[in-house]
Image: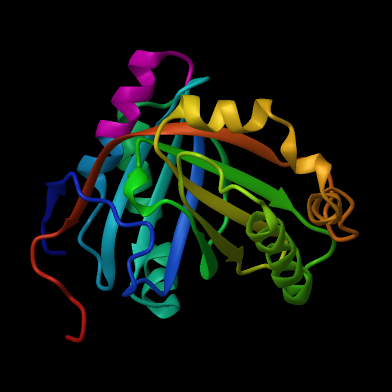
Amino acid sequence: MKPTKRTSIVNIRDPRCGAVIPSQWTLQTQDSQRAAAEAALSAMPAAPGLLCFSLFRGLDDFTLFLLSQWIDEPARDAYIAVSSKPRAVVDEALPNIVRDWRYPSSFYRSFIGDESAGLGCLVVVRQPLRGNDHQIQRNWVDTVIAALESQVEPAPGLGAANFFLSTDGTHVLNLGEWKSADAHRSWLSRERRGESSEWQAVLSHPGAVSGGDVRRYEFLGAVEPVESYINK
């Protein structure tokens, strides 16, 4: 494997990205949260097709959100087949990590808001869905985007909402780019989503089931290959 290098640039909407591996870990303390992030960044190899591997720290708990972006699904799946090796390195350093979930996914659609907002806070919405139907996934996302587009005033501080469909058909992940955690909290406190028929359609969507969550994160660090494997 070729080496990786640290980077502070994360592009959730990288047009080269054809597949992702999003996952969530839970740690016991803030110190172990940061130590686990550092161990994961150090252990990540420059696998063929890797674009970027990013780590985000939970602002309201001791979770980590991990996102690896890949040129396509074959490259992603080839890494998954050998991912036990870097995982073992991390577990040796921190044996008490709880790996809550991992859903290999592909990008579907984005809602673009204020692109000048930046990525001060990443809001991860994990929505489980009934069965394993890709059409239900797409329909749920389309319903949410229709609700976002119906708002008279765009959500202040929302740069973009990026929707990814899990390969197994069971989940949708919305990676929201927000200016700040306070901007997201302020939007939620307004409870404007329940005031329109479009948001009611989201809340009553027949494909949605309970068990999802919404978490806020701040960027900790990222790595990318020193030399690109793309098109090699």
In the depicted view, which residue is nearer to us: 83 or 146?
Answer: 146
Q: Residue at x 56, y 63 (%)?
A: 164
Q: Position of residue 215 (x, y in %)?
A: 56, 33
Q: Quadrant of the N terminus?
A: bottom left
- 229 relative to 12, above or below: below
Q: In this rendering, would 102 be left or right of 9?
A: right
In the depicted view, which residue is nearer to us: 172 or 96?
Answer: 172
- 95 relative to 231, above or below: above
Residue 217, quarter of picture:
top left
Q: Position of residue 212 (x, y in %)?
A: 72, 42
Q: In this rendering, would 90 be left or right of 141?
A: left
In the depicted view, which residue is nearer to us: 144 or 164?
Answer: 144
Q: Can residue 26 be seen in the rendering of this structure?
A: no
Q: Position of residue 95 (x, y in %)?
A: 42, 27
Q: Residue furthest front?
A: 152
* Secondary structure mostly taken by the magenta-highlighted segment of the chain: helix
Q: Residue at x 52, y 20 (%)?
A: 60
Q: Is residue 14 magenta?
A: no
Q: Residue at x 46, y 28 (%)?
A: 181
Residue 142, quarter of picture:
bottom right
- 155 relative to 181, above or below: below
Q: Quadrant of the C terminus?
A: bottom left
Question: What are the residue bounds of the magenta stretch?
Answer: 27-38
Q: In this rendering, would 153 be left or right of 87?
A: right
Q: Residue furthest bottom?
A: 231
Q: Position of residue 179 (x, y in %)?
A: 39, 37
Q: Residue at x 86, y 57 (%)?
A: 205
Q: Is residue 35 magenta?
A: yes
In the depicted view, which residue is nearer to us: 125 or 182?
Answer: 182
Identify the coloring.
rainbow
